[in-house]
């Protein structure tokens, strides 16, 4: 459904002015934001699609799948202000998986309503984007009952180095994108095609379709597969070759979501990498400028945790452990957030933090995307940071090497 479909719907339903007038609020007022979100959802779900639009949408829906089968689809938002050079809009709009016909039309309108969610309005206010100039499309895709899935960066998302970074986990990709699983991480040298590294994670959970209800659920990974390597060398090379083709097509480094079923690779989404700065990479030569990874941490204590560094910088601060949705309000300037994972609702607290450490997550997790955008170091996939660290503890994090040290940094030495 194109952006024109959305505009036509809100104009002919006479709700356009009510929708956008509700966004003229203080982005820091949580009560006003909640009221606006509720009002937008009510307006959009209350109004009915015109018969002609509804018939066209359902006709396209029936064309997906085989006659006689229940058609399960993914319904994904695609706003006109997403994946911009200075703003990722990570997690701001909704995606619904394993959607059945009975839910289908409402899920489309819920995608539209997510343009007016409290987190989306707050984010746009902070970035200075006009609410009235935005539109939203909806993409509908046939569900792939993925055996393996993940993401692929055709250049390193932090440094711009010409290395393909692939993350993979069992089941649907929601586990990787949401950051509640730490995926395997594979790095391929684009110049030689050599697999430089393969880091195998303990993948505790996966996203799957419940066979009885058809709903998308989180499930435990069988114990014998938790630390099993997801991708073979042949699959890594096939993905890397595909990544080269996708980047050639778009003529820019890409962030690609993919899934496999019976050895066939499906590209679910491709978008530009938004976090590579102009001076990170010399586009003509592929040479990378030296970064914070050239320094080592001289901290007061030993390495406490190891994970995946997702933004190359070093910072010291005081631990603030977040275990519930209400606790981000306790984060002060210069604290280091420690959480199982972060969510879009935690962005205001992340803006105040000096750094972030999470139990789960990879290079495409919400934590990784937002920390790179904010320019603060983060270490994800530490497994047990929320159990090993305590509130008010002084730590130093190295966002390049993926280490968390006891105590405050005393100096930096060239490595």
Image (cartoon, rainbow, N blue to C red):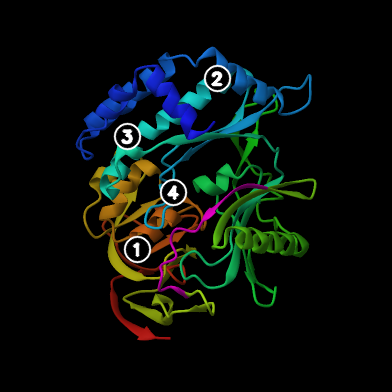
Magenta span contains residue 278:
yes
- Decide if residue 102 is on the left or right side of residue 302: right
| SS for callout 4 | loop
| SS for callout 3 | helix
Question: What residue is pinned by disc 2?
Answer: 53
Q: Earlier in the sequence, mark 4 or mark 2?
A: 2
Q: Nearer the viewer, mark 4 or mark 2?
A: 2
Mark 3–mark 4 Cα distance, whole angstroms, equals: 22 Å
Quarter that holds the N terminus = top right
Q: Residue at x 64, y 72 (%)?
A: 190
Q: Which residues are magenta?
A: 267-281
Q: Residue at x 42, y 15 (%)?
A: 47
Say which quarter of the image contains residue 415.
bottom left
Question: What residue is pinned by disc 1?
Answer: 375
The image position of residue 94, as x and y in percent, is 47, 35
- Decide if residue 98 is on the left or right side of residue 334: right
Is there a contact, CB below 8 Å, between mark 1 and mark 4?
no
Question: Neighbour class for label 3 at 10 Å: few (<14), some, many (≥20)?
Answer: many
In-front residue for pair 383/364: 364
| SS for callout 2 | helix
Question: Neighbour class for label 4 at 10 Å: few (<14), some, many (≥20)?
Answer: many
Q: Residue at x 66, y 21 (%)?
A: 59
Magenta span contains residue 81:
no
Question: What residue is pinned by disc 3?
Answer: 118
Mark 1–mark 2 Cα distance, whole angstroms, equals: 44 Å
Q: Earlier in the sequence, mark 2 or mark 3?
A: 2
Question: What residue is pinned by disc 4?
Answer: 340
Q: Earlier in the sequence, mark 3 or mark 4?
A: 3
């Amino acid at each position: 459904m194109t952006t024109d479909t959305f505009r036509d719907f809100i104009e002919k339903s006479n709700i356009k002015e009510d929708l956008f007038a509700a966004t003229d609020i203080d982005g820091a007022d949580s009560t006003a934001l909640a009221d606006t979100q509720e009002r937008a959802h009510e307006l959009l779900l209350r109004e009915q699609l015109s018969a002609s639009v509804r018939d066209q949408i359902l006709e396209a829906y029936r064309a997906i799948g085989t006659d006689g089968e229940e058609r399960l689809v993914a319904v994904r938002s695609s706003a006109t202000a997403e994946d911009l050079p200075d703003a990722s809009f990570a997690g701001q709009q909704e995606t619904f998986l394993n959607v059945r016909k009975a839910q289908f039309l409402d899920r489309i309108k819920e995608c539209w309503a997510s343009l007016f969610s409290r987190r989306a309005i707050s984010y746009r206010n902070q970035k200075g984007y006009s609410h009235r100039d935005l539109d939203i499309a909806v993409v509908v895709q046939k569900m792939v009952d993925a055996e393996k899935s993940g993401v692929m960066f055709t250049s390193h998302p932090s440094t711009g180095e010409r290395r393909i970074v692939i993350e993979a986990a069992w089941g649907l990709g929601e586990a990787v994108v949401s950051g509640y699983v730490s995926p395997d991480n594979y790095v391929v040298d684009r110049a030689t095609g050599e697999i430089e590294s393969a880091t195998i994670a303990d993948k505790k959970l996966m996203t799957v379709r419940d066979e009885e209800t058809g709903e998308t659920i989180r499930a435990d990974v069988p114990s014998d597969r938790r630390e099993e390597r997801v991708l073979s060398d042949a699959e890594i090379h096939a993905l890397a070759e595909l990544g080269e083709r996708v980047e050639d097509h778009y003529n820019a480094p890409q962030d690609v979501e993919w899934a496999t079923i019976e050895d066939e690779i499906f590209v679910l989404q491709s978008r530009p990498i938004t976090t590579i700065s102009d001076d990170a990479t010399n586009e003509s030569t592929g040479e990378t400028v030296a970064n914070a990874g050239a320094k080592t941490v001289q901290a007061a204590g030993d390495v406490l945790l190891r994970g995946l560094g997702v933004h190359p910088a070093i910072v010291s601060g005081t631990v603030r452990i977040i275990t519930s949705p209400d606790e981000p309000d306790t984060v002060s300037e210069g604290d280091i957030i420690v959480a199982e994972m972060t969510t879009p609702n935690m962005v205001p607290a992340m803006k105040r933090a000096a750094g972030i450490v999470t139990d789960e997550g990879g290079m495409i997790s919400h934590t990784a995307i937002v920390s790179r955008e904010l320019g603060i170091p983060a270490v994800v996939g530490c497994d047990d940071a929320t159990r090993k660290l305590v509130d008010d503890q002084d730590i130093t994090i190295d966002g390049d090497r993926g280490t968390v040290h006891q105590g405050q940094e005393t100096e930096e030495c060239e490595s």
